[in-house]
Image: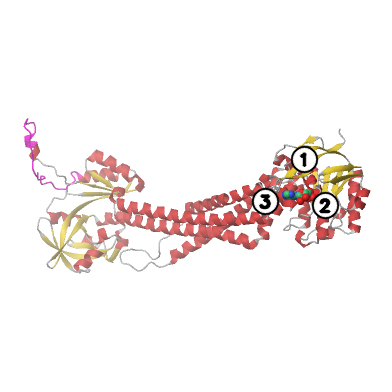
Amino acid sequence: MRLFKKSVNLDIALTHLLSKKKQTFVAMMGVTFGISMFITMISFMTGVNEFMMELTLDGSPHVKIYHPIENKTVAMDSFAGSAEMTVLHHPKPKNELPKLKDGHIILEEISSLPEVSGALSQVSSQVFYNNGPVKFPGMVVGTDILKENELYNLTEKMIEGNITDLLTYQDGILMGLGLSKKLGASVGDRVSLTTPEGQTFFFRVMGIFAFGMGAIDDSRSYASISTVQKLLQVDPSYITDIHIKMKDYNEAKSLGVRLEQSYGYKAEDWETANEAVLVGEIIRNTMTYVVSITMLIVAGFGIYNIMNMNIINKMRDIAILKATGFEGSDVSKIFLYQSMIIGCLGGILGLLLGFIFSSGINQVPFPQNDFINIDTFPVNFKPFHYTLGIVFGVVTTLFAGWFPSRKAAKVDPVEIIRG
Amino acid sequence: MSTLALKADHISKSFYDPVTFEVLRDVSFEIEKSKFYSIIGKSGCGKSTLLYVLSTMDTDYKGTLELNGNVVTGQSQNELARFRNEHLGFVFQFHFLLPEFSVLKNIMLPALKLGKYSKSEIEDRAYEKLKLVDMTEHALKPASKLSGGQQQRVAIARSLINDPSIIMGDEPTGNLDQNNSRIIVDIFMKLAHESGQTIITVTHDLDIAAQSDNVIEMMDGKIISMT
Ligand SMILES: Nc1ncnc2c1ncn2[C@@H]1O[C@H](COP(=O)(O)OP(=O)(O)OP(=O)(O)O)[C@@H](O)[C@H]1O
Ligand SMILES: [Mg+2]
């Protein structure tokens, strides 16, 4: 019986909508436009965000363990226990190497942790790259190149050359694209490096890579671990960094804290290392949501106006319905159904159109660029965004229809019928 | 069981805009069940106003109104709507149909709202009522495509759809020719005398008044005679 009553109201709502097809269509288009823009913007913006995130995450460890050189001084120790007050000016740190003691054991322990997907040890050092009389500061990283490839997909990032060449040539080096440009070096050329201790060595460029991040590409080179150890004149147990990739990168922070506690070295997680990137992402996301929601609200006002006009035009009908026994709540349902139908249909169409637009953007070729390795603009296709879009669309139209429909419920039939 | 269909007790109503004007002045009367009543009087004497009060649509009056033994004065709008739906049929002075709906649908809507019968039963009943007013052939036309008199006949059919105990009409035959007018009056007589429904119509047609069981005559917001 109740269902029956409902269907009468729905029936009337549908008849009203169909008898004013043009108006219905215009109202629907408002919602469609709002939601399709919302979907397009959010898909594109989060696509870009996620791509940048991946780019950042791709080239950096989830957790990095290293030995920070602090301004620790031994001078103070000599005065310890003395009753006099001692003032120390400009203390010099003791000569400490950034070495991870028992690095290989630490690496083995970390590699066996269940939440870790891979880990490697590196010997890294600041060096100067010489191009004639000009020196460029940079880094040289001694690493197990195959392991490095496992963690960072180095093969994909190679523009020229082959990573396995490092295994065969002792003096081979893989160089970042930006750095190679600064040095004017291409594959096969010999470049010279100067260590902080002042030794100069020659290396042969075996390959050129690009991560798409200036911080890496403009300064870094890879060489084999033993080569760099030789360069720095240290023993084969000497390592400076351990890089860890997690199975779930969200757990990096907590692992970092634990590792710091158990080994006493600095363990920096990616979020801390890339704070600036994350802040940028939050700002972009906020802007996307604000703009999209504004568009939906504008569409909502459109519906509000149309429903209001609709009700003014339908005063006579409302009066007749009430005179023949329809209650205020029935009348308000009739108009609420109308805006709901407009909202739902317009919303679904909006999702569809949004999907088409974002697929379109996803087809647009990305301007060719050595640094960034994508063919087309990055776009996300997340069910969550589509759910959000339709929920938002329906809620907005519900609100937009609510006030006019309350007004319709309060129409006094006698006033209209009296003429 | 009471034989009263309607009891109006000291009903007064004033309009305040633009000046205070008392349209109904202390009107009291009773209407018996299964009778055909006519209300007559000069234009502007308050007939329509009285009928709107009796129909429960206008609640802005002083006095008490009883319909079928229930005091309806003071009931909520929703209660009144439900009461109208089930017990009252109404034909307006200016035929009022829903223009977007077919003739058939116009007649069916109050019954669909009542929800007492299934949709197909309601459709059958609607065709029955259409046949009474000789409009069957126009059943599927949109209501907006009918002549004034045709619309009025459809409105009469609609007022009958829920078999209301009281049917009120504000000049229900005002737009009809003599022949159709007589058909409607015959229907009303039959409903009153054979189905036990009560008919109250405002009319200017003295022939109709002469045929009805009782005549209420109004002047300047008062009832001056009841026969
Ligand atoms: N909304 C209103 N505001 C003020 N006065 C009104 C209003 N409606 C009706 N009146 C006045 O009330 C009086 C009675 O009107 P009503 O419509 O009841 O007359 P009636 O007897 O039905 O006339 P008719 O036979 O022409 O239909 C008239 O003088 C009219 O001017
Ligand atoms: Mg009148």
Q: Is residue B184 left or right of residue A267?
A: right
- Check if mark 3's residue and mark 1's residue have beta carbons within 8 Å: no
Do dots 2 and 1 share one subunit? yes
Asked if residue A24 is among those painted magenta in the image, a careful observer would answer no
| Position above or below: A145 against A82 | below
Which badge, 2 or 1, is on the more N-terminal residue? 1
- Picture coordinates of residue A15, whole percent (x, y): 69, 56
Label disc, if present, on residue B43 of the rendered structure: 2
Q: Which residue is mark 1?
A: B12
Few, some or many residues within 10 Å of mark 1 (<14, 14–19, 20+)? many
Label disc, if present, on residue A57 of the rendered structure: none
Question: Which of pointers 3 and 2 indicates the residue nearer the eye?
Answer: 2
| Position above or below: B141 against A337 | below
* Quadrant of the snapshot with the C terminus of chain B: top right
Asked if residue A89 is among those painted magenta in the image, a careful observer would answer yes
User: Which chain's residue wears label 2?
Assistant: B
The quadrant in which residue A227 appears is bottom left
Q: Is residue B104 left or right of residue A83?
A: right
Marks 3 and 1, how far apart at CA: 39 Å
Chain part drawn in magenta: A77-102
User: Which chain's residue wears label 1?
Assistant: B
